[in-house]
Amino acid sequence: MSEKLTKVNVAVEELRSETFEVRQENSVLRKDLEHSKEKLRKAEEKVDEAKTLSAIAERRVNDLEQYGRRNNVRILGIPESYGEDCEKKVLDIFRN
């Protein structure tokens, strides 16, 4: 009977040891998971910030393009030629 009790005690101690190791490993994995979640959260914040900055830059570029076109007038029905003096051509059309 004493021998059986000793075997049971040894088995219980082995299980306790294994349980302790599993708990330690679980603790390490939880810390790693929390660290990974924090890194992901920061990366998502950076992506959101980059999207916002990209949208702002896109609006600014669009505004600049529109501003650059403000003084341009397109006259349809008049053929364009390379190297022409547009101002002279328009003045000639309006004078005639």
Image (cartoon, helix red, strand yellow):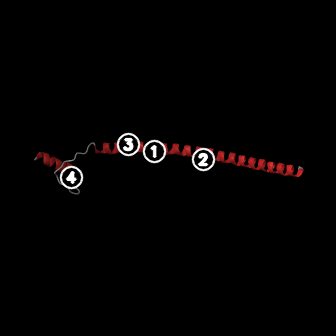
69 and 83: which is toward the camera: 69
- The residue drawn where x is 60% and y is 47% is 36
The answer for how far apart the CA atoms under marks 4 and 3 are is 33 Å
> Residue placed at 43% from the left, 45% from the top?
54
Q: CA distance from mark 2 to mark 3?
A: 35 Å
Q: Residues within 10 Å of mark 1 (few under 14, many from 20)?
A: few
Q: Are marks 4 and 2 in contact (CB under 8 Å)?
A: no
* Circle 3 residue: 59
Foreground of the two, 26 or 54: 26
Foreground tag (2 vs 3):
2
**Residue at label 4?**
85
Around disc 4, counting alpha carbons within 10 Å, would you say few (fewer than 14), some (14 to 19), or many (20 or more)? few
Which residue matches tag 2? 36
Disc 4 residue type? Asp
Mark 1 belongs to which amino acid?
Answer: Lys
Residue 16 in the image: x percent, y percent?
A: 78, 47
The CA span between labels 1 and 4 is 43 Å
- Secondary structure state at the residue bearing disc 4: loop
Q: Could you classify mark 3 by the number of other residues whose Cα lies within 10 Å: few (under 14), some (14-19), or many (20 or more)?
A: few
Q: Is residue 24 left or right of residue 45?
A: right
